[in-house]
């Protein structure tokens, strides 16, 4: 969210128009609002750390991708559909 906002609305005009609490906020803070600035403008503090969430999501995706590769090569676990099909034949 931060990079898109900075790239397409560097002055924060969209944010200022649709988030009235932040209409007087300095644009340099709008894209990644520090908690002290959020409190000053009576705006909720950030609930999600997007850098951490992105890293965790990429890690989970990589694990899922690796597991899917194992399932398609016949290395799936006991409860998988591939293993059940193999047992029937």
Image: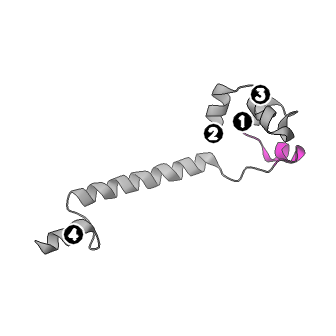
Q: Which residue does the numbered mark 1 point to in the structure image?
A: 31
Q: Which residues are magenta?
A: 31-43
Image check: 13 left or right of 68? right
> N-terminal of the two: label 4 or label 3?
3
**Residue 55 position in % (x across, y down):** 53, 49
Circle 1 packing at 10 Å, graded few (<14), some (14-19), many (20+), is: some
**Residue 69 position in % (x across, y down):** 28, 54
SS for tag 1?
loop
> N-terminal of the two: label 1 or label 4?
1
Of circles 2 and 3, the one toward us is 3
Image check: 81 left or right of 45? left
Q: Which mark is residue 64?
A: none
| Quarter containing the C terminus | bottom left
What residue appears at the point 67 percent right and 29 percent down from the top-left corner?
6
Separation of marks 2 and 1 at Cα, in angstroms: 8 Å
Rendered position, 7 above or below 18: above
Query: For the image shown, how many numbered marks are present on the structure?
Result: 4
Q: Which residue does the numbered mark 2 point to in the structure image?
A: 1
16 magenta-colored: no
What residue appears at the point 33 percent right and 58 percent down from the top-left corner?
67
- Specify the farthest residue to the left: 89
> N-terminal of the two: label 1 or label 3?
3
Q: Which residue does the numbered mark 3 point to in the structure image?
A: 13
Separation of marks 1 and 4 at Cα, in angstroms: 49 Å
What residue appears at the point 83 percent right and 31 percent down from the top-left corner?
26
SS for tag 3?
helix
Image check: 44 left or right of 74? right
Q: Which residue does the numbered mark 4 point to in the structure image?
A: 83
Contact flag, marks 2 and 1 (Cβ < 8 Å): no
In the figure, residue 60 lies in which quadrant? bottom left
């Amino acid at each position: 969210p931060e990079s898109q906002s900075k790239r397409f609305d560097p002055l924060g005009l969209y944010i200022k128009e649709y988030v009235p609490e932040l209409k007087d906020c300095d644009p340099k803070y709008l894209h990644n609002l520090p908690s002290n600035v959020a409190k000053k403008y009576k705006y909720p503090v950030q609930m999600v750390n997007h850098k951490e969430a992105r890293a965790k999501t990429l890690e989970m995706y990589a694990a899922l991708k690796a597991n899917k590769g194992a399932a398609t090569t016949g290395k799936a676990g006991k409860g998988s559909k591939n293993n059940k099909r193999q047992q029937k034949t």
